[in-house]
Amino acid sequence: DAMVIQNPRYQVTQFGKPVTLSCSQTLNHNVMYWYQQKSSQAPKLLFHYYDKDFNNEADTPDNFQSRRPNTSFCFLDIRSPGLGDAAMYLCATSRSGTGSYEQYFGPGTRLTVT
Amino acid sequence: AQSVTQPDIHITVSEGASLELRCNYSYGATPYLFWYVQSPGQGLQLLLKYFSGDTLVQGIKGFEAEFKRSQSSFNLRKPSVHWSDAAEYFCAVGAAGGGADGLTFGKGTHLIIQP
């Protein structure tokens, strides 16, 4: 089945230690998104890639970076995680230009910062 | 800027009873509207969507939603809930015309099913 895969599902990192979260997709969608969801809150968009073009949300901290080496993969890098970065990180994909704009979400990576 | 309001943080419904979850949106043009469901520790699953056309849309798992432009609402309904429907429900709005913008989510409604 075509899907959005996130690895790892659970990640523990130390305060200030860089961490990378991974997302891959078999849907061949051209748009990939990263959302941050803190406990009992709505998902909040951090940034997205439209093909190779990176689009950062205005209020996304500089501590968060992303890479998309090819259509299938997208990475979220947190350069110096703080305690406030503990959250569920959701990757999503969509295909633009087809008139069908729903986003398909992966299962998420739960990040704990110690 | 677009926004979504889900006025009910928690809703408790008896199994077999009907359900309505409220969603109001703010957007300057015709919005793209979605309902997603999230089980604990899981990602979001799309229940249904509205882009245009018939204002009553059917989704998966027996859910439906009605778009009412005059009320800026997109309420989710189900005639008879099952214990497995217990989850967090998010209403979301997307900007029309591009298809690449991120979604703006409401804060969610936590659905509790009583036996």
Image: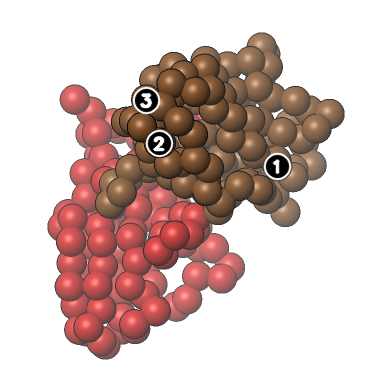
Q: Give the percent coordinates (x, y) of residue B81.
A: 43, 24
**Mark 1 belongs to which subunit?**
B
Determine the colour of chain A. Answer: red
When the figure is inspected, residue B109 is found, relative to residue A34, above or below; the finding is: above
When the figure is inspected, residue A100 is found, relative to residue A88, above or below; the finding is: above
Image quarter hosting the N terminus of chain A: top left
Of label 1 and label 3, which has the lower sequence position? 1
Pointers 2 and 1 in contact (CB under 8 A)? no
**Mark 3 belongs to which subunit?**
B
Residue placed under numbered mark 3 in the picture: B82
Q: Give the percent coordinates (x, y) of residue B107.
A: 55, 53
Pointers 1 and 3 in contact (CB under 8 A)? no
A62 or A3: nearer the eye? A3
Confirm whether circles 2 and 1 share one chain: yes
For badge 2, the amino acid type reads: Gln
Residue placed under numbered mark 1 in the picture: B25
Residue placed under numbered mark 2 in the picture: B114
